[in-house]
Image (cartoon, helix red, strand yellow):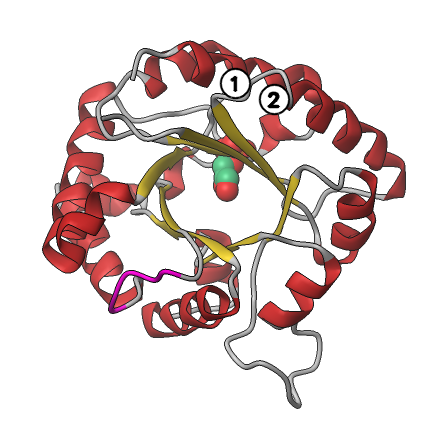
Amino acid sequence: MALKKLVAGNWKMHGLASDLAEVRLIAEAARGYSGVDVALCVPAILIERAARAVPDFAIGGQDVHHEPKGAHTGCTSAQMLLDAGAVLTIVGHSERREAQRESDAEVQSKAHAALECGLNVILCVGESLEVRESGRAVDTVLAQLDGSIPHEPTEEAELAIAYEPIWAIGTGKIPTTEEIGEMHAAIRGRLHERYGAAGSGVRILYGGSVKASNAGEIFAIADVDGALVGGASLKAADFIPIVAAAATVEG
Ligand code: 13P
């Protein structure tokens, strides 16, 4: 049985109070697609206002600290995200793995902290262009997965994996359908090894230059259970057609 698709937007460092109108448009339009889960991960400072603006819609964060509280200037805990109205968070995005030098172990502790609090997690993995060209993409991503996913499946909240090849993010380039299919099948295999039957229930999203024109093809690939969308999630006019594509794909 195919899993219900999840289409999540990652607004990265975009979004001011004036963009709440767009959040409202997206939430309103998403209501027409009950067969798809839709979420927006907005900048931390916008979470509370977004969650108040669209109370029935899933608003998320983009990162979380692994400690519940303490002397961590500029950081946000899972409890704080929940308190602000978030129901999910991204962890381990490649932009943070690179710019903030986040290790697999750190990403894993962030995922644990969020899941234990009841915050759903989208955990990102993905290879560089150099790794892809060297033929080591699958091994590299599986090693990242081994190092960063929680030891055991959690009951408190949902874990999803986002496969985001770094070279496909914001570039307009995407892997072939065979490459996406191969990677998602490998991730599914690893999830089964780690979690047994529960591995079948973990949604595996694809991310990297997803837009309306390629979404249908991507969603039709086996074990693609949704998408994590950057640039094309900022405007309802770009994002909702992606949600619509997820709704029309035969599972
Ligand atoms: P783009 O959709 O802009 O390529 O970004 C993908 C991404 O990084 C989502 O987390």
How far from the left and from the top, in percent, is residue 15?
A: 77, 42
Location of residue 214 in the rendering, given as x and y in whole percent from the top left corner: 42, 14
Instruction: Say which quarter of the image contains residue 20.
Output: top right
Query: Residue at coordinates 20% horizontally, 37% vertically from top-left?
Result: 183
Q: Which residue is mark 2?
A: 239
> Where does the magenta region start and end?
151-155
Q: Position of residue 5 (x, y in %)?
A: 41, 28
Q: Verify whether residue 154 appears in magenta.
A: yes
As shown in the figure, which amino acid type bears the numbered disc 1?
Ile
Q: Are marks 1 and 2 in contact (CB under 8 Å)?
A: yes
- Residue sitting farthest toward the right: 18
**Please, is residue 233 above or below residue 116 in the view?**
above
Per the image, is 153 magenta?
yes
Residues at marks 1 and 2, CA–CA distance in whole angstroms:
5 Å
Query: Which amino acid is tagged 2?
Result: Phe
The foreground one among 118 and 141 is 118
Residue receiving disc 1:
242
